[in-house]
Image (cartoon, coloured by chain):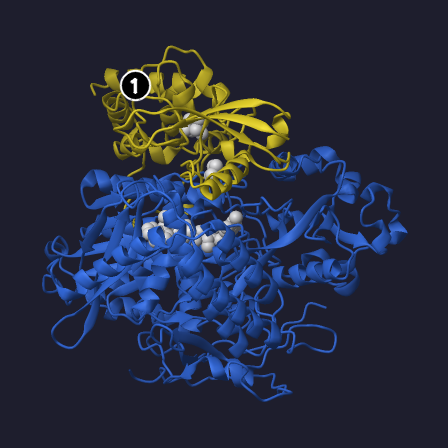
Chain colours: A yellow, B blue
Amino acid sequence: MKLTLKIWRQPDAATAGSMHTYDVDDVSGDMSFLEMLDVLNEQLNAKGEEPIAFDSDCREGICGMCGLMINGEAHGPVTTTTCQLHMRSFSDGDTITIEPWRSTAFPVVKDLVVDRGAFDRIIQQGGYISVNTGSAPEAHSVQVPKEAADRAFDVATCIGCGACVAACPNGSASLFMGAKITHLGELPQGQAERDSRVVNMVAQHDHEGFGGCTNIGECTAACPKEIPLDVISQLNRDLRTAIKHGH
Amino acid sequence: MTDMPDTTLTSHPSIDVPLEVDTDDAVDYYTPGAPISDTKAPDGPIDQRWSTRKFEARLVNPANRRKLSVIIVGTGLAGASAAATLGEAGYVVKSFCYQDSPRRAHSIAAQGGINAAKNYKEDGDSVHRLFYDTVKGGDYRSRESNVYRLAEVSTNIIDQCVAQGVPFAREYGGLLDNRSFGGVQVSRTFYARGQTGQQLLIGAYQALERQVHAGTVETFTRHEMLEVIVVDDGAGQSRARGIIARDMVTGEIQTHLADVVVLASGGYGNVFYLSTNAMGCNVTAAWRAHRKGAYMANPCYTQIHPTCIPVSGAHQSKLTLMSESLRNDGRIWVPKNKADCAKDPREIPEADRDYYLERIYPSFGNLVPRDIASRAAKYQCDDGRGVGPEVDGVRRGVYLDFADAIGRLGQEAVEEKYGNLFDMYARITGENPYEVPMRIYPAVHYVMGGLWVDYDLQSSIPGLFVTGEANFSDHGANRLGASALMQGLADGYFVLPHTIRDYLADGPFEKVEETHPAVVAARESVEKRIEHFLTVGGTRSVDSYHRELGHIMWEYCGMERTEDGLKKAIEEIRSLKDEFNRNLKVLGSADSLNQSLEKAGRVADFFELGELMCIDALNRRESCGGHFRAESQTDDGEALRHDDQYAYAAAWEFGGEGEKPILHKEDLVYTAIEMKQRSYK
Ligand SMILES: Cc1cc2nc3c(=O)[nH]c(=O)nc-3n(C[C@H](O)[C@H](O)[C@H](O)COP(=O)(O)OP(=O)(O)OC[C@H]3O[C@@H](n4cnc5c(N)ncnc54)[C@H](O)[C@@H]3O)c2cc1C
Ligand code: SF4
Ligand code: FES
């Protein structure tokens, strides 16, 4: 198929960007979206135009490195990551608009690449269980009810891609944060730090410039791992409890 | 260096089939060097060596640790776990990765699980059995002391991960579930659905970020290490004292100095261009160290995984693995008649299908080890009976059929077990595997080769330690499923933190200035290389060279290797590399994010590695594990080892620019286990 692509280009964080239009031919339905961009980049390189910068690594939907706004939707029209989106989801003659994640807390680095360092800084504030290497008790000394273990797993599948933030009109990272709060909060091992964890992570979230959650639900709709909206309720409940406990 | 530790129970190689031709095929390609040995593993009974070493390794006073700095390149399981643990101990740690977050290292992609000798199922598992299985699985080409230690610390890993909140699969009673994996007869694999690597890595990542908060670890994301700094300490000893890294966003070339350097930079499977590795996986960190004196061991040992989604066209950028658990229920076949290859498989009657694994290996059937399953698929396709789309005139695919399983267990049960894999397959191929048999083909998946290390995980450069897939130590010629995750975490959490202290007990070392000639030289060589890539001004893109190199490697240094093929590959690599240096086209600048420039450096190193892999494969005229030399097989086409001549690890020293590499052999001595020839018939 033949496609017209409108792509955001921006040399670096300090320089203003703009949309550019490119044509690509010979796109097959078996190509992934990023392979289609590879083909375009080969063409640009041959013409002497600098290739378009975009992030990806595993290209199998698990590392969370990729992420593009495709026709205004985070990761495009299918519930998956950008790298797992295939061109058979598009038709010959389509025009596709491609932009980077848009959020104050994710500044553009170049073209379609953004800086998601804010996510790491949120985790630094308490997204863990404090246990030094070697000090762990025998694994079977604590039983975890299967339902809790399954729920913890389901929400621990978050890949930290940032689509939830990009999709949210407020630019909130509540889904990302709620997933971590719920993962650790479901487990007996996570209880000791439950209060401080939520308080400190939320403080960092706000400090980074992410917006507040007003329950719109665009985040869940865009999430490639289908993290459910109720992790945000869990986050809010934990926050209230922590405040009640005097945090 | 002293000799190998004295061993009493040495069993001599049991199979001594004399070689038909008694020549070294690689004789013109290398210079023989002195033998080497591992001087760090203590003597004595195998089950006490690690305790002995831990006891003998000197301690570092907690107050001194704050004065000792450690650079760790890599944030996968092997790097993140080490950074967290050394940070907790109080050392000053700098952690580097090329991704935008430590959490994205390629360990994240592991699906199947992690082994540990917990024996929770009471099915006869033990540390000794895990040790035995791993040595046997490695086809008796690994170092027994290292493997024993790996099995020994495996149980601590599970304890640690559970305490961190890794959500392993559990049974209804709330205890951990296990499965049997990769043809092993005990259930010792712990898993978190199909995302074990992700969950383990998130655990290690969180421990790492906790240390960032505590101020002991500083992370450098989107930083690529491009050189190691080796400095003479004035007493005639050269030591690794730092790295040169490029800030991939600003292009700034930075010097980072420390008392010790750890490489946990992962595997180099991307030398084949198409592999199941992530796009950025590379050999640069390891290769730069190699060029500075670190020996590269067994580089030709590559693992090719049989259950990957086949190539769909020339645009293909990477291959996707599907867990080999699929082989538990799927049946592998190709049409008996070439004429049927393009047909809808559902229309090919039973009588016209060749279930070739079940036919050739009646007792193991579809569950034969990875290398056997892979090679068998290649032979069917070479024979013109492959299926799926023609790419470059050949159909490279075989069917993995679940029709029987669906008939026997019902679609729901199959969905329950494999649903996520089926979904992934459907998304990538656009076909519904519940209705049409899946197509699979082997792909490069893992490299057993890597930088040579001793029992302490120290390379041949003092002060340079290597952990995880980047080293060669534990898997011999073939790795068992669920053992790489185990090794990464064993190295990082439980081994390196003990062995590195013995080295650091001599520190802090004399301060190195940025103006030191060795530092300046390292920096300048990096700058010169970057300048070179940007000014060649040719016509071909980096990717086009990488793809062509990959073709050569896959064709001649892939599933089956021959003397002629390898020699041809070496010639082709050399001439392609020559063209690469004259005709490369990299646009953009050095002082901004430039992905083509990053790739150029990696591909340049892959060229040199590829050549060494071929030389190593040429030298080893035997078949073992993932390395199959067509000249060394039994009458019925089985791999044939030659323990009389090749029971060594090949440690290659860089011979200088344009010079032949130097081969140092480390004899592999088994005291606790007897060498046997594999048979899966
Ligand atoms: C698809 C797939 C499935 C697998 N499934 C399993 C499984 O089920 N069980 C199992 O045991 N094993 C499995 N493996 C193997 C296993 O995942 C890997 O061998 C292991 O995770 C490697 O870990 P590592 O820490 O050594 O390296 P990696 O996780 O690859 O990490 C490498 C790190 O080094 C950094 N790095 C590399 N080069 C540089 C540089 N020049 N400068 C700066 N940083 C650099 C990277 O940024 C990264 O942080 C699988 C592998 C693949 C590809
Ligand atoms: S919650 Fe979903 S969308 Fe948000 S970072 Fe995690 S995986 Fe991505
Ligand atoms: S590239 Fe890893 S999730 Fe898309």
x and y, in percent, of residue A222 in the image? 48, 22
x and y, in percent, of residue A99 in the image? 43, 25
Let me know if residue B8 appears in the view: yes
Horizontal arrangement in the rendering, residue B470 relative to residue B275 (left or right): left
Horizontal arrangement in the rendering, residue B302 relative to residue B534 (left or right): right
x and y, in percent, of residue A34 in the image? 51, 36
Q: Nearer the viewer, residue A170 or B156?
A: A170
Q: Is residue B666 above or below residue A238?
A: below
Who's the residue at 81% across and 44% down the image?
B345
Q: Chain of mark 1?
A: A
Who's the residue at 85% across and 50% down the image?
B340
Circle 1 packing at 10 Å, graded few (<14), some (14-19), many (20+), is: many
Q: Is residue A35 above or below residue B349?
A: above
- Quadrant for residue B406, please give it: top right
- The secondary structure type at the circle numbered 1 is helix
- Quadrant for residue B386, please give it: bottom right
Q: Nearer the viewer, residue B500 or A27?
A: A27
Ligand 2 lies in which image quarter? top left
x and y, in percent, of residue B511 in the image? 10, 61
Q: Can you say which quadrant of the picture contains the N terminus of chain B?
A: bottom left
Let me know if residue B78 appears in the view: no
Q: Amino acid at mark 1?
A: Leu
Horizontal arrangement in the rendering, residue B255 relative to residue B266 (left or right): left
Give the residue number, with chain letter if any, for mark 1.
A239
Q: Nearer the viewer, residue B552 or B189?
A: B552
